[in-house]
Image (cartoon, grey):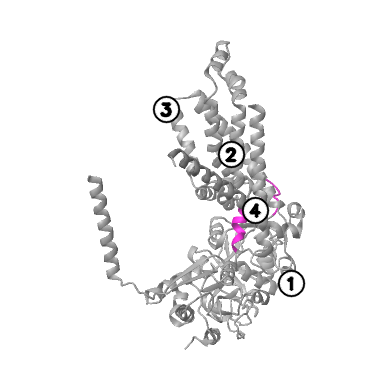
Amino acid sequence: MNGDRITKVILFISSLTILILGAAIVLSLAGGSVPAFREYGLRFITSTVWNPTAGSEQYGALPFIAGTMITSLLALIICIPMAFSASVFIAEYYNGTRIASILRSLVDLLAGIPSIVYGFWGFYALRPLLIKTGLTDQGFGVFTAALVLAIMIVPYATSLSSEIISMVPAELKEAAYSLGATRREVISGVIIPTARSGIVASYILALGRALGETMAVTMLIGNANLIPKGLFSPGNTMASVIANQFGEADGLKMSALIAIGLLLFLITAIVNAIGKLIIKRFA
Amino acid sequence: MKKQTLLLMLIVALVAVSCGGGGQKPAKAKQVTLSAAGATFPQPFYNLAFKKYNENGGPVINYGGIGSGGGIKSLRDRVVDFGATDAYLSDAEMAEMPAEVVHIPSCIGAVVIAYNLPGVTGLKLTPALLEGIFLGNITKWNDPAIKKVNPSISLPDMNITIVYRSDGSGTTYIFSDYMSKVSPLWREKLGTGKALNWPSGIGAKGNPGVAGTISQSQGTIGYIGFEYAIAQKIPMAQVMNSSGNFTEPTLASFTSAANVEIPADTRVMITNSPDPDAYPITSFTWIILYKEQAYANRTAETAKATVDAVRWLTGADAQSIAKSVNYASLPQQPAEKAEALLRGITYDGKPLGE
């Protein structure tokens, strides 16, 4: 066998392994969630009651689906202004300068901070600030979690979109400038339309990251298994409830947690599919 | 060339070091290692006790704090030598086990009501107040009902925030078992369990999570293991027991709670104890193991080591270790029941206990 063939075989085996692993994860999630879906059917997704007490057991995932969607979307909304200005700053205004590269590494550094550290920061630094505003008694809740999530996903939204923005052909920009366009007009009239699909894709990527975030959210959201009543009310997310409750779970409860895992997997897949669709539409 | 020489030297040095280590501690050919898993509630005690046991010539015991449910599961799957749980196995759970399981109480733990109120200590609570607060019917700290029981304390005009366990836990089980005994409304609404459907409040993960949240946030109240309140110096409420006495949570008042008739299999919840000195939210925590130790290719040595270790845990040496980490020691009656159960453990039908 020559080197080329060996490489080919190795690459084939590796990619096959990834495929098999992915399929195995989906299969075992689906298999494990059968008892929960058999017991509750669609009610599992629409019911708001999560009662693990033996005798009156009932599991509904709606509070967690709602918590996940609300915190992630809110985080994305808070994140976009920060990420957009940072990426324009890095890739357009100060492209190639020292200050841009410092900012770029600082933003990338944010991605390297462990989730638990964000949780600690939220718990000890952000929460007291929110309590001082008088909007919340204890500072736990959907808004606190979303705020920390927003900071956590900024690097994901920023690095890809600044990459895309810097790839906008210089001729296009120069042409616009030569026609007398201001910088703001070049950004809104040339850069954004050209890089739109890439920018949107980077936000979708960031959203996917927010959906699955666990530790920092658990520390700040208040872990109440109810649909949040307001921005400052406690709630819970899908990833967080799994992390909290699987330790002592068995039987139907374990199956319900696995089913939530499957739903989270599906939601993430759908979000990614939407992202791909958007890229295709605008590319 | 230089690199290779260095590498060679490194290897020689490593070999020398490992040989040296072997020389100091002659490898025991028949050294038994035991594995155990279960409740996190008594884990600080088990970790320390098993470490001391090993230092005094006993086998290495690896204890995984994976929760009571995990401990029961691990024993059922026969992947540990013994398990540990805060809630004894129900008859249904006993029937699910592949063979007969015995419960050995190892120490007494208590769940305390910890709170964070600026300038307030010595809070007294009755079962009715606990019910009102934790079911969300009393929402202000200066509620007349709390004032009536605590006339000498100036209570602030502040919202009450309940902090509960977001993960399934034996601590929640003990607290809810007590509440279900003293409050019909609680029994109807929340019941007894390792995780509950809380109507209000915020959840935090693990005893350290609840303790940390309470100590960091004013106006909070929650239930935690006694040792965590001691470690974080969080004020604990006095709770009125079944005789109408307000009792401080202390090791002595926990031990008093075990002054009840203990059944032969030790499966009993001692919450709401009738003893007049008892702190009412108190419970045994148990080691669980199979009555017949010959299973899954276990050797007679392993079986003997398992029983010896559990017997040592209920003995005087280990019980004084328990006290040093704020768990109450077993009184005479449950200790005797535990010994009788250990004598009944067999290997291939032959008794193991001497």
Residue at image location 46% in from the left, 42% down from the top? A6
The quarter of the picture where the C terminus of chain A appears is: top right
Looking at the rendered structure, whether the residues under marks 2 and 4 are on a common chain is answered as yes
- Which amino acid, mark 4? Leu
**Quarter assignment of residue A225:** bottom right
**Marks 3 and 2: CB-CB under 8 Å?**
no
Chain ID at mark 3: A
Which amino acid, by three-letter code, is at mark 2?
Answer: Ala
Q: Amino acid at mark 3?
A: Arg
Can you identify the residue that label 4 sits on? A27
Q: What separation in Å lies between label 3 and label 2 (alpha carbons)? A: 26 Å
- Spatial distance from mark 3 to mark 1, Cα to Cα? 69 Å
A120 shown above or below A95: below
Is residue B332 at all visible to an observer of this figure?
no
Specify few, some or many for label 2: CA neighbours under 10 Å numbering under 14, 14-19, or 20 or more: many
Residue of label 1: B184
Crowding at dot 4, Cα within 10 Å, few <14 / some 14-19 / many 20+, comes out as few
Q: Secondary structure at mark 1?
A: helix
On the image, the x and y values in percent for residue A170 come to 52, 18
Label 4 sits on a secondary structure element that is helix
- Counting from the top left corner in percent of width and height, residue B313 is at 47, 78
Q: Which residues are magenta?
A: A226-247
Q: Is disc 2 placed on a helix, strand or loop?
A: helix
Separation of residues labelled 2 and 4 (CA atoms) = 26 Å
Q: Is residue B352 left or right of residue A199?
A: left
The percent position of residue B308, horizontal first and vertical second, equals 46, 81
Question: Which chain is mark 1 on?
Answer: B
**Residue with the most extreme front position:** A1
Query: Where, by quadrant of the figure, is residue A200 drawn?
Result: top right
Q: Single out the mark in the foreground, 3 or 1.
A: 3
